[in-house]
Image (cartoon, coloured by chain):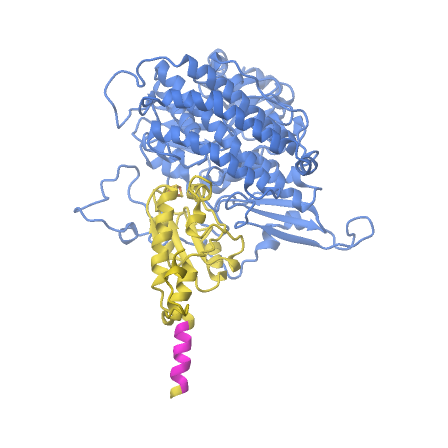
Chain colours: A yellow, B blue
Amino acid sequence: MGLEERLPDEGVVTTTLEQAVNWGRKFSLFPLTFGLACCAIEQITSGVSRFDISRFGSEVFRASPRQADLMIVSGRVSNKMAPVIKRLYDQMLEPKWVIAMGICASAGGPFNNYAIIQGVDKIIPVDVYTPGCPPRPEALFYAITLLQQKIQKDKFRDRAYGRQLAAEAARGQA
Amino acid sequence: MTAETIATAQATAAASHPYNEVVPGAVLEATKTGLVVSPDRIVELARYLRDEQGYDYCSMVTSIDWPQYFEVVYYLYGAATPKDALVLRVRLTDKANPVMPSLTSVWRGADFQEREVYDLMGVRFEGHPNLRRILLWEGFEGHPLRKDYKEPYFEEESKPFKSRHPDGAHQWAEDRVPWKDNVSYPVGWDPDLWRSPEVQYRRIMGVDEATGNGDGLRTERILVNMGPQHPSTHGVFRMVIAVEGENVVGLEPEMGYLHRCHEKIGERNTYIMNIAFTDRLDYVSSMSNNLGYVLAVEKLMGLQVPERAEYIRVIMAELTRIISHLIAVGFLFNDLGAYFTPALYGMRERELILDLFEAAAGSRMMCNYMRFGGVMADLPAGWVERARNLVWNRLPKVMEDFENLLSGNEIFQSRTHGVGVLTAAEAINYSMSGPMLRASGVPYDVRRAEPYSIYDRFEFDVCSRPEGDVWARFRVRMDEIYQSLRILKQALDGLPEGPIMPPGKKQYQVRVPAGEAYARIEGPKGELGFFVVSDGKPNPYRYHVRAPTFINLTSLEKMTLGHKIADAVVILGAVDIVLGEVDR
Ligand code: SF4
């Protein structure tokens, strides 16, 4: 059912490599098992039978950053935690994405004082911001679908390795 | 304040106070809110109170920054035989260098709490075994709870801020204040030169390399870091464990990765704004947190709560207890390797209870439901029927499932029996509370010892087990769910009609008379206390939370020593911590 029914007799589809790879990537996101605060409880809840995050192909939470490609920052980021988050993000392999879940991770939330960084985007790049305190699991799913749209449009040459390849090619021509 | 303390205060002038006959010169003054004690004699007095007077339980330690002096406050109770509160207050007039002797030698439970006072208020405790920062990071400058501490994003002393939208446009706080940057280091302190483990963990690493472990094998002591990002630390908690082979020989809990200084924020907020912030303390049981806080403020305001509201509060608090225990049990199994299945079963039932919360309060998790004098909204139509169905039909069946699936499990039994034992005396001395205390054979429950709200009307048993191990903690939690169901049945049957708030106009700015109040409730995780000092302004002068899980962690090292490193995970799981509350 689906794609294969509409294939012509030869069974050949032409698309760009970028499209095909992105299509694969967006439906198999591996989030990092990483909960910070209250929002983490809703993040766990999104995995239970009622909400079921696996409908979006991202239910396999990995405890090691080396195996994960999506970081859901679910909660407030304190100054004490910030270096840890930065290190975790650095340990994840390219390509990687970040969802800032909740107002705390997005902009500091209700805690504007010395201990809290006003938004995780001050230390790592964020792809999708999710409002709410805490966002419901549905809101997290919406963030994931938005991220999937973004991944589908991902350009290889804009990523670090793409830029590196382009630089090498340019050097070869010169 | 309890009747007993007030009575003693009025009856005796300070000099002839009965305690002064035993420990001369200890009590300087007997006030309405406790005994003012001389810092030089406090250790002696404390020892006498513990051994002769039965005040064996040091429940809460906190501090207040008054204009003339720092005041350190100790709340003592009796746990083996319940006693009313006795409050010791130590006034340290040297504001530049406040020092007092530590009481950890008398009550081990004061350990983390004194460290917290040192960290946030800057009072030094002489003789404390490990006096270093606990919630803030090494290299932080200043003590944020002091009144003269100005935060980086400081705007005004108290909310609501007039300066937020000066000409209708939003401005970044950083752009406006002179403190700007979030981090400043003490003079002469260089993060690059600082060597963490040797300095910080010398206590647990202190070992004579030549002697080895005693049985002829020379093993090296290794420092293992668990967390802050670790799947079984229940959040961002870090355990620094010194191991020899697989045996734990030292452990230091490191917390504060979620610290946002709830108390400092609370002192800038108006009273009513704080209710929403208490939701975010122990974020799986927001209703209990609300209850504890409003009780404390109601004590100050002297409010009478209508019947119906009292019943609704009890119903909400007990539903919260069920949620919290289901999650605790589920995640304990998670730590033991039953990857997520039991936790998911627990979460499934939790969803049904959250639906009830959402119907009543409008929000699933952060309910913000209680108000001073009552509750925010009445129960919607059909709510009681849904709750009855859950309590009478669904949850008992679920509990049966849980018992069948989990309690008899062989692996679970062999991993938990005799692991992480705390005797009754140790549990009291370490200020354990809640299921942790009761699992060590001390049947102490605030709902019984000092009934609040309308708990004196309900029949229920205080569950306790003699073993004091992880198994007993699991069992106590399971049994408490049955007792909660029992209370819920009585409360749902007895729920009267009537108003839910005291008569009068709805108020957004409550007037709280000057004074001091401490209210404690039996939260799902232990004794949850709220300490509020008012000076008559719209904001609390001092606001402190006795976080049960924070204090329960004091005994973590004691429980873990001698076990294998894999057991450390299980023991931590059985403490049932929530980092929002530990770090505040
Ligand atoms: S956004 Fe709200 S729920 Fe999420 S971590 Fe912050 S305070 Fe907690």
Q: Is the magenta stretch mostly helix, strand or loop?
A: helix
Give the left or right position of residue A94, taking residue B339 as reference.
left
* Residue sitting farthest toward the front: A9
Residue B126 in sight: no
* Percent position of residue B520, x then y: 47, 24
Residue A164 covered by magenta stretch: yes
Q: Residue at horizontal 60%, vertical 25%?
A: B438
Q: Quadrant of residue B425?
A: top right
Q: Residue at horizontal 39%, vertical 79%?
A: A167
* Residue sitting farthest toward the right: B216
* Percent position of residue B30, x then y: 48, 19
Ligand 1 located in image quadrant: top left
Q: Residue at horizontal 46%, vertical 14%?
A: B490
**Magenta extent:** A162-172
* Percent position of residue A129, x then y: 34, 51
Q: In which quarter of the image is residue B103?
A: top right
Where is A9 relative to B139, above or below? below
Residue B441 covered by magenta stretch: no
Residue B205 in sight: yes
Mark count: 0
* Percent position of residue B485, x then y: 50, 21
* Nearest the eye: B88 or B477: B477
Location of the N terminus of chain B by quadrant is top left
* Residue sitting farthest toward the bottom: A174
Give the left or right position of residue A121, taking residue B345 as reference.
left
Give the left or right position of residue A5, taking residue B166 as reference.
right
Location of the C terminus of chain B by quadrant is top left
